[in-house]
Image: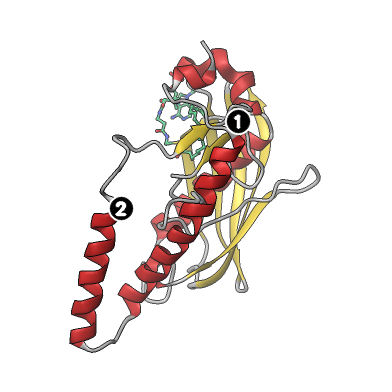
Amino acid sequence: MSLIGDFGVDPMTPEQFDAEAALFGPLTDSVRTLMEATLMSEAEADDVARARALVDEAAALLNTRRGGIALGTRWGTDGIRRSWGNAVMGLRNPVAPPLEFTHDDDGPSWAEAELGGLYEGPPGLVHGGVVALLLDQALGSAAFYAGSPGMTGTLTVRYRQGTKLGPVRVEAALDRVEGVKSFVVGTVITPDGVCAEAEGIFILPREVRHLAGELAQSFHPGEG
Ligand SMILES: CCCCCCCC/C=C\CCCCCCCC(=O)SCCNC(=O)CCNC(=O)[C@H](O)C(C)(C)COP(=O)(O)OP(=O)(O)OC[C@H]1O[C@@H](n2cnc3c(N)ncnc32)[C@H](O)[C@@H]1OP(=O)(O)O
């Protein structure tokens, strides 16, 4: 059984991926702008009511046709995987900041993002769960890039200081591999310095161990 067959999804051609990215990427950006505006708006009541009606109309339009299950991960006919539903970096997910990871052979994997009020926990600071979310993805992505992908088994985060809303950099690197377990480390950094450090153990689940090679090769640079 191939990787694609195991997850029950039809592969998409590169042309289909391009068309979907061109159509839904800008929509995702617009919705992200809308979410930020919803949070920060001090508009007049009439304008807020009108905006709500427009948003409801847009949602109804988009819902005229929709997929049956959440499956933001799709494989291409080329064997490459794209995680467009991913909550951290998905091209079609407005909740994603989004983070776009760069992977180098001679340094850590890294991504930078501007985290605004949508991600607030304590006043003016990034929510601790969001910090863990970014680290989970960064570490998982680094393991994937290193050729030893896995699901998060354990993630330990040490919050050293508050992470101010604003520019954030996330870094991660594979430390070592022991059998099906990848040990990965990472940090969240702002202009104030290191705000959080993480260690994670990523485990290739037994159900997909027979697909390890195919899974590792499905990695798409810039995603995870
Ligand atoms: C990449 C894999 C892929 C499939 C999916 C393909 C599509 C990919 C698409 C996109 C990927 C990119 C997206 C990344 C997103 C960020 C990562 C997440 O958010 S992941 C979600 C949160 N995590 C879970 O939901 C895990 C839930 N837990 C489990 O599924 C299992 O418990 C699992 C896989 C962690 C272990 O189950 P077992 O049955 O496969 O493992 P056993 O064979 O029992 O153990 C293997 C070894 O691991 C140790 N181990 C088991 N569980 C551990 C744990 N929780 N922590 C540390 N070590 C553990 C054991 O002691 C054993 O060690 P010894 O080989 O004997 O040395």
Indicate the position of residue 8 as horizontal and vertical percent values. 41, 21
Give the mark count: 2
Q: Can residue 140 be seen in this view?
A: no
Say which element carries label 2: helix
Nearest the camera: 99 or 44?
44
Q: Earlier in the sequence, mark 2 or mark 1?
A: 2
Q: Which residue occupies 36% across, 70% down?
A: 34
Q: Quadrant of residue 2?
A: top right
Secondary structure of the residue carrying numbered label 1 = strand
- Residue 182's tag is 1
User: Quick one: 184 or 222, which is closer to the camera?
Assistant: 222
Q: Give the vertical position of 109 relative to 1 (above or below).
A: below
x, y percentage for residue 157?
49, 50
Residue 11 at what x, y percent from top left? 51, 27
- Residue type at mark 2 is Leu
- Give the residue at x 68% y 32%: 176
Query: Which of the colour schemes (rainbow, by chain, secondary structure, one colour) is used?
Result: secondary structure
| Mark 1 crowdedness (10 Å alpha carbons): few <14, some 14-19, many ≥20 | many
> Is 115 situated above or below 175?
below
Compared to residue 168, the image places residue 46 above or below, namely: below
Under mark 1, the amino acid is Ser
Q: Tell me, for residue 62, which label it has, or none.
A: 2
Q: Do the residues labelled 2 and 1 touch (CB within 8 Å)?
A: no
Residue occupying the far right of the picture: 106
**Which one is in front in this view, the residue at disc 2 or the one at disc 1?**
2
Query: Residue 94 or 68: which is nearer the viewer?
Result: 68
In the rendering, at what x and y percent does residue 43 appear?
28, 87
Residue at the location (41% across, 57% down)? 94
Q: Give whichever of 97, 169 is nearer the camera.
A: 97
